[in-house]
Amino acid sequence: MISKTYKTEPAIENPHKIHVCRLYDDASAQINHLTLQPGESLKPHKTPVDVTFYILEGTPTVHIGDESEIFDKDTLIESPADIVHYISNEGLQLARILVIKAPRPERASKVL
């Protein structure tokens, strides 16, 4: 049995300069845990695979293409491949998000 938590896994360097822990990394999928402090944001970017966001804590704003919406915890959001997307935390509380990419992008083993 393998178990991991965002509290025990090391943070990985990423171009967004935010706290990211890689919880799962296999050819079939990649799962990252993001922590966004109030005022923090990912940089707008595209991924070559579908991405799913699951809000664990806080009320981050998810931006996909021309759409932006604030989501509460326990919400799952789907983002299709090759569309600009990012997440921002405009609230006053910490936001924690799981980011699931399936299958894992080839270059994503080193990048968020």
Image (tube, rainbow, N blue to C red):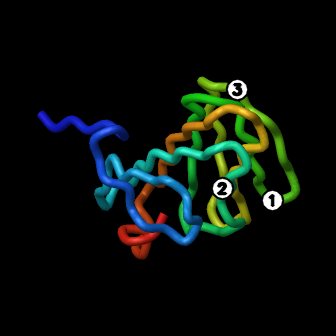
* Of labels 1 and 3, the one closer to you: 3
Q: Is residue 82 above or below residue 98?
A: below
Q: Position of residue 72 (x, y in %)?
A: 70, 26
- Image quarter in which the N terminus is found: top left
Q: Amino acid at mark 2?
A: Pro
Residue corresponding to mark 3: 72
Reading the chain from its start, which is encountered first: label 2 or label 3? 3
Residue corresponding to mark 1: 65
Q: Spatial distance from mark 1 to mark 3, Cα to Cα? A: 20 Å
Reading the chain from its start, which is encountered first: label 1 or label 3? 1
Q: Amino acid at mark 1?
A: Gly
Q: Residue at x 41, y 61 (%)?
A: 104
Q: Residue furthest left?
A: 1
Q: Secondary structure at mark 2?
A: loop
Q: Residue at x 59, y 29 (%)?
A: 57
Q: Secondary structure at mark 1?
A: loop
* Of labels 1 and 2, the one closer to you: 1
Given residues 80 and 96, the one toward you in this image is 96
Q: Confirm or deny contact between disc 1 and disc 2 (CB under 8 A).
A: no
Q: Is residue 77 above or below residue 82?
A: above
26 displayed left or right of 32: left
Q: Position of residue 42 (x, y in %)?
A: 65, 59
Tag of residue 80: 2
Q: Secondary structure at mark 3?
A: loop
